[in-house]
Structure formats: C-alpha cells, structure tokens
Image (cartoon, rainbow, N blue to C red):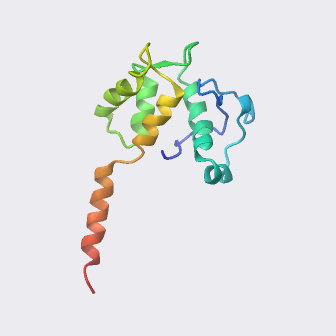
C-alpha cells in the first residue's frame, strides 16, 4: 500500500471510484480517515485520503484526469517511489486501460500502491544492514 500523502485532507471520496470527493468528512458514503480505519480497511482509508487529492486534479464528467496534468504528475513524483522521469510512462500505462486514456481514481490508487517505495533503496538498505550484522 502507498504511503499517506504529505498533505492529504481527511475528506471522503466517492466510494464508486469516480474521484468526486466531497468537502465534508462524511461525504458520498465515505467516513472519516482515522488510524483505526487504516488498520481495519486500508483500501477504504486510501480511497478517502487519495480520493480527495484526486478530486483536486479536476476530473472530467467521466471521472478521468488527463495524464498531461502537471499537478497529477507532480503529486505522483513527490508522493511515490517513482523518479520524476518515470512518472509519465507509468501514468500512460495506467491510463491505457481506459478508452479515453484518462486516469480514473482506481488507476491513480494503483499507481501509488504499486510504486509506494523504490525497491532499489530497500535492497540497498537491507544489504547495508546485512553487511553490518555479520556473524557473532
């Protein structure tokens, strides 16, 4: 699962996945984002946190956001493990499942989930720790 956004408002997203989050915490069948919700229903918690962020990108009437959206690209680059130069290709890959090549909330969540961390950094940290441990 992806890390929580740096400045994600605790507002709800439409549980239908169209990215039309409301301004109030109990909007559109959501609820409030809480630590308990993260522990009991991570998918819903991510939808609440990232749904309000996605709604801020101004989805179209069909619920999509163009992959050329600068705020979308900046957010993904800043709040995921993707290097900025790979953001465009990952967004295009995710949007390619839709006829209009626009990113939906479900696609946005998938990109963030699949790129929560850079695997190379994790491996480097592991190897560094494993090398320090040695045998007693």
From the top left corner, tell me how far across and down residue 86 is, in percent.
30, 33
Q: Is residue 21 left or right of residue 2?
A: right
Which residue is nearer to you in this view: 100 or 11?
Answer: 100
From the top left corner, tell me how far across and down residue 136 is, in percent.
28, 87
From the top left corner, tell me how far across and down residue 20 is, in percent.
63, 23
Q: Residue at position x 49%, y 19% from top?
A: 65
Q: Quadrant of residue 98?
A: top left
Instruction: Tell how many labels.
Output: 0
Which residue is nearer to you in this view: 83 or 18?
Answer: 18
Q: Is residue 30 above or below residue 81?
A: above
Name of the residue lying farthest toward the bottom:
136
Q: Residue at position x 41%, y 23% from top?
A: 95
From the top left corner, tell me how far across and down residue 97 is, in percent.
41, 22
Q: Residue at position x 31%, y 27% from top?
A: 89
């Amino acid at each position: 699962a992806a890390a929580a956004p740096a400045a994600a408002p605790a507002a709800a997203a439409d549980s239908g996945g169209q990215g039309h989050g409301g301004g109030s915490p109990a909007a559109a069948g959501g609820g409030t984002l809480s630590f308990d919700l993260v522990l009991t229903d991570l998918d819903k918690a991510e939808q609440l946190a990232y749904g309000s962020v996605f709604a801020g990108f101004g989805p179209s009437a069909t619920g999509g956001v163009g992959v050329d959206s600068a705020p979308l690209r900046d957010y993904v680059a800043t709040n995921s493990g993707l290097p900025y130069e790979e953001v465009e290709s990952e967004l295009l890959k995710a949007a390619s499942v839709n006829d209009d090549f626009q990113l939906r909330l479900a696609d946005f969540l998938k990109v963030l989930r699949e790129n929560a961390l850079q695997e190379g950094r994790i491996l480097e940290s592991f190897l560094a720790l494993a090398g320090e441990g040695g045998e007693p």
